[in-house]
Amino acid sequence: MGRPHGKRGAVGAAITTEASDVAAIVGITGSIAPSASDTSTGSSDLSISSSTTTGGSGVVPHYSVRRPMIYHLFEMEVKRISALNAEAVACFSVGSFSLSLCASMCLEYIFASRPLSDAAIIVLQWGPYFFGVVALVCFVFGIWSLWRKRSDIEQIKEEHRDI
């Protein structure tokens, strides 16, 4: 008998057998029980023993088949894709850090007690702009790295041919 799978909802549950992909939708008051032929002959037929449902709707499961593709990659291509991922993560990390510094400097400027020292005035006047530009540049480079990775993967898929 196949392994039961599917999502259990408020209205019912779905169960399948691997041999024939038979699905049974059962209402709240219903249950699934093996038929008498299942125990004696070893078949995988299921029968539904349930009372009439009190209302609502049933969920009809949708079955599909996955057909994964295998792409043969050179070590150089794997390293390039991995390097582009690492570059994007680094750019987004530095950009997020710079953006948080920019935000904290703006909040510090708003809630700072007066009078400010000369160094604090210079930092609070130029710091948010500097770190804002750094954050913007890092985010742009991170998006560019992801775009290059995607175009490399699309090129690998285009160069693939069925045998």
Image (tube, grey):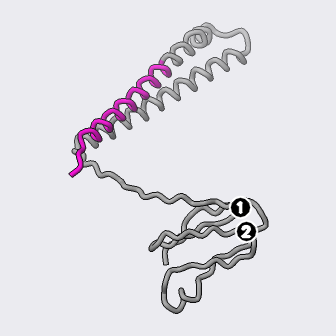
Q: Position of residue 67 (x, y in %)?
A: 37, 55
* Amino acid tagged 2: Ile
Please tell me whether the stretch drawn in magenta is mainly helix, strand or loop. Answer: helix
Look at the image and say whether residue 140 sits in the magenta stretch. Answer: yes
Give the side of residue 75 with respect to residue 19, left or right.
left
Q: Earlier in the sequence, mark 1 or mark 2?
A: 1
Q: Position of residue 30 (x, y in %)?
A: 70, 74
Residue occupying image coordinates x 32% and y 51%: 69
Residue occupying image coordinates x 53% and y 80%: 45
Look at the image and say whether residue 63 sits in the magenta stretch. Answer: no
Q: Secondary structure at mark 1?
A: loop
Residue occupying image coordinates x 64% and y 17%: 106
Q: Position of residue 127 (x, y in %)?
A: 55, 14
List the residue tagged with mark 1.
10
Give the side of residue 147 with respect to residue 103, left or right.
left
List the residue tagged with mark 2.
28
Residue occupying image coordinates x 49% and y 26%: 95
| Disc 1 + disc 2, Cβ < 8 Å | yes
- Residue located farthest toward the bottom when viewing the structure as drawn: 40
Which residues, given as a range, are shown in magenta? 134-163
Distance between the alpha carbons at the discs numbered 1 and 2: 8 Å
Residue 108, quarter of the rendered image: top right
